[in-house]
Image (cartoon, grey):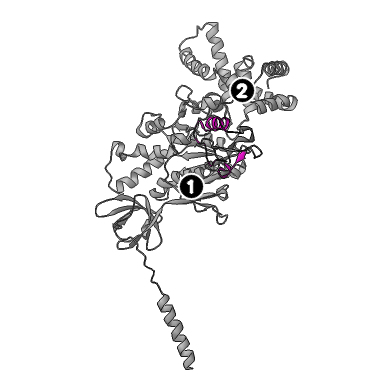
Amino acid sequence: MSDFVESLFSDLQKQVDEFSPKIERQDVGTTIEAGDGIARVSGLADVTAQELVRFENGIMGIAFNLETDSVGVIILGEYSEIEEGMTVYSTGRIASVPVGEGMVGRVINALGEPIDGKGPIQAEGYQPIERIAPGVVERRDVDTPVQTGIKAIDAMIPIGRGQRELIIGDRQTGKTALAIDTIINQRGKNLICIYVAIGQKRAAIARTVGVLERYRAMEHTVVLVSAADEPAALQYIAPYGGCAIGEFFAERGQDALIVYDDLSKHAWAYRQVSLLLRRPPGREAYPGDVFYLHSRLLERAVRLADRYVIVPSASEDEAHEGQAIDGKVYDGPLAEHEAATDLEAMDEASKYKVARVKGSGGSLTALPIIETLLGDVAAYIPTNVISITDGQIYLESDLFNAGIRPGINVGLSVSRVGGDAQAKAMKQVAGGLRLDMAAYRDVAAFAQFGSDLDKATQAQLARGQRLQEILKQPQYVPQNLEQEVVVIFAGTRGYADEVPVDQVQNWEADLLRHVESSHGELLREIREKKAISREMEASLEEMILNFNRGWVPE
């Protein structure tokens, strides 16, 4: 027995000798005020801006205001459960969202948690919602189109991968419809879409998700929701979380498209939390940094430059950075040229070649939406976002109500960089379409005041009316590039001039059916070459003339 006791004491003594107390230092504070989605906390002396903090009941918040004797916290959850006197702990982490391929096809909240009842998400990691936008050297020119499937946009206001194109207009003018049609059209085009719903009614969000599922667009889409009844703090962080998910795909060499619907409500949410935290108000009661609110978000849209390495000539065309023979990775706009120059200067250059780094060269395209009041595009938030983006699509309520849908005002809409990305075939057939439509709208306005018009003006009006009908498009019916090219070719070359205006859309539908059934090789050639040769132009003209001879109006 005594041996057993001695052995026991020996083991205990050994454990005591080996014991090393674990000392942790944690920044702790106390809630001194809470309500309306914000809390004021004393203590937390070492907390950093935008750091996540945790209340003792598990609810998270973000340190928003760092003041001399307190910290203003925006609460990411049910703020009614936060009480005065509660202990608050710093976490040392910035707010993050889960990212990964498992997000595709899911509906999540602003924190990345699934809300679609389909079980947990298999995330590949976490990414901070706030990140510095890529620098100039990491970017390249926008040179690849995003085919929206909407004739008026692809022809007159083209959008490129990596561009930021604003969709702006009054309520009920079809802004969301344009974005949803664009998402639907990306099926099979290797483009991941993220739809961020900010401050919308849950019924409207459910309707949008239903449309995406019906047209099988959820297969390539992530829907991030921060509804109107959620705290302003969640509406504030929602677009940044969506952007982090998009960046995950872009940094893997994939292409992503993100829709922010809409940034007007995002600005309202930011104004709300800022005023509650007593930040000094400026114009229209927005805080002074409201421009930075959207600029730091939209600057994260990017077309990343490809990276290159020099590898043995037997290697594949795409390589990993570790395969570089000299360990050097070439990046920036001139990366390929610099790598080729160094290769020429090498001894036995024939044994090596320049290869693109696998996973480089992705893109994130942004389509922010702004709602105007009574068409006032000169208001504070609209002018801010217009100045940040690379162009805008202005939807006019008068055109929409007149049945011209999408109701795009060609004169006020522009794409500053998308022209470089437009497919050559579309440039060939739609080069002057934008100016023609703008001129038609001007002439049509003057024609209302007089009937004595010369023949040239009458012809311009007749052509414009038919082109306007051709550019009309029902919702959820996006078209492929080759279909758009054929229809716009026919319209701009005058082959629809003899068609009655009220029959133009029937004529267009019959023409497309005829081309698909009898001249599929023309569509295939446009799709593959993305350009129109003289021979193809002659074939198109002959095909349309023959079709017109046999076409009978309904």
**Which circle, 2 or 1, is nearer the viewer?**
2
Q: Is residue 514 visible?
A: no
Q: Nearer the viewer, residue 525 or 468?
A: 525
**Image quadrant assignment for residue 516:** top right
Magenta region: 318-347
* Picture layout, residue 249 above or below residue 426: below
Left or right: where does residue 48 sit relative to residue 471?
left
Where is mark 1, residue-wise? Answer: 225
Q: Is residue 474 left or right of residue 512?
A: left
How crowded pointer 2 is (Cα within 10 Å; few <14, some 14-19, many 20+) is rated as: many
User: Mark number for residue 425?
Assistant: 2
Residue 187 x %, y %: 62, 38
Task: Say if 211 sits above or below 420 in the image.
Answer: below
Q: Earlier in the sequence, mark 2 or mark 1?
A: 1
Of 513 and 77, which appears nearest the observer? 77
Q: Is residue 59 above or below residue 49?
A: below
C-alpha separation, residue under disc 2 versus residue under disc 1: 38 Å
Q: Is residue 534 above or below residue 213?
A: above
Mark on residue 37? none
In the rendered image, residue 309, in percent from the top left (x then y), is placed at 56, 38
Could you classify mark 1 by the number of other residues whose Cα lies within 10 Å: few (under 14), some (14-19), or many (20 or more)? many
How far across and down, in percent of the image, does residue 457 sit?
Answer: 52, 9
